[in-house]
Image (cartoon, rainbow, N blue to C red):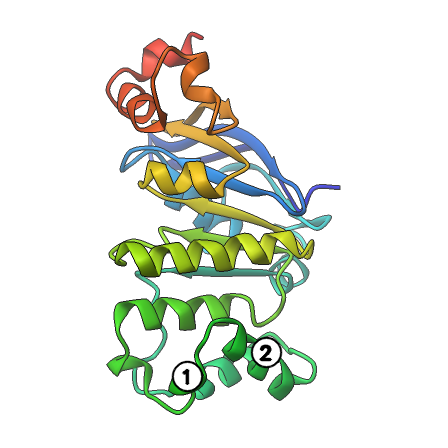
Amino acid sequence: MSVLEVKDLTKTYGTNPAVKGISFSVARNEIVGLLGPNGAGKTTTIDMILGVLEPTSGTITIEGNDVARKKSEALAVTNFAAVYAQLPGNHTVHENLNIFGLLYGVPNRERRIDEVIREFDLEPFRNTRCGVLSSGEQTRVSLAKATINSPHLLLLDEPTASLDPSTAQTIRQKIKGYAAKGIGGVLWTSHNMQEVADVCNRILFLSHGRILLEGDPRTLPHEHGKKDLEELFISIAREPLLHESL
């Protein structure tokens, strides 16, 4: 069974559809890239998966739990990280992790906090307030928080945006390592096509709320006559109707 199943998902604001009947899944051990230009519907889709937004229609199932009917059970095995969702800066690394450990009801909480602090190389900052950390250090804390409950579904919205190349590579390796453990799957949004090709097993291209293309990021561009993922992205952003007919 897939970790995440999205079926015929739609979100409409008044008469304006933001997401138009999309369906996809994320399997265990899999990193799926959710790609598309600004306004394509990526963040709206993630917000619906997280239960922040209520779909107009369609279903979202996480580990067999329908988010609409069993929200608590679904979100208990889900977590999220994004550069725009920073942790409270007046709390230390340990305090923030402890708070989220309590919220998720993490068993053996202190031991799990120690594990994620080691995993994301945060020991020197254990008692440092998050507000004074660098962007790369804050990203590592956000990912530690996002894995504190060993989620079966990890949602990452532009997790490496604004990071320097070295730090971004470190973060990518951490996420690939997490997916490889077999605990769950990852849904990843990014505008960095080189990163996507390096990290993702499969990609979904969104445009104007629809999934236009799906496939392996390493072979999909050539299947559509493009030299690389960035060229394919630009083509979809500029000429979505061309790809919708393929």
Residue 218 is left or right of residue 241, and the answer is right
Picture layout, residue 238 above or below residue 1: above
**Could you say which disc has been placed on residue 93 in the image?**
1
Task: Assign the C terminus to one quadrant of the image.
Answer: top left
Callout 2 secondary element: helix
Please state the horizontal and vertical placement of residue 154, each as a whole percent of the image.
54, 55
Q: Residue furthest front?
A: 166
Three-letter amino acid code of the residue under disc 1:
Val
Give whichever of 111, 38 is nearer the camera: 111
Please state the horizontal and vertical placement of residue 237, each as a whole percent of the image.
27, 24
First of labels 1, 2 by sequence position? 1
Query: Which of the two marks, 1 or 2, is nearer to us in this view?
Result: 2
**Could you say which disc has been placed on residue 3 in the image?**
none
- Residue drawn at 63 percent across, 65 percent down: 76
Task: Assign the N terminus to one quadrant of the image.
Answer: top right
Give whichever of 138, 102 is nearer the camera: 138
Task: Please indicate, yes or no, whether residue 66 appears anywhere in the rendered image.
Answer: yes
Task: Name the residue that disc number 2 marks.
Answer: 115
Please state the horizontal and vertical placement of residue 183, each as a whole percent of the image.
68, 57
- Residue drawn at 33 percent across, 12 percent down: 241
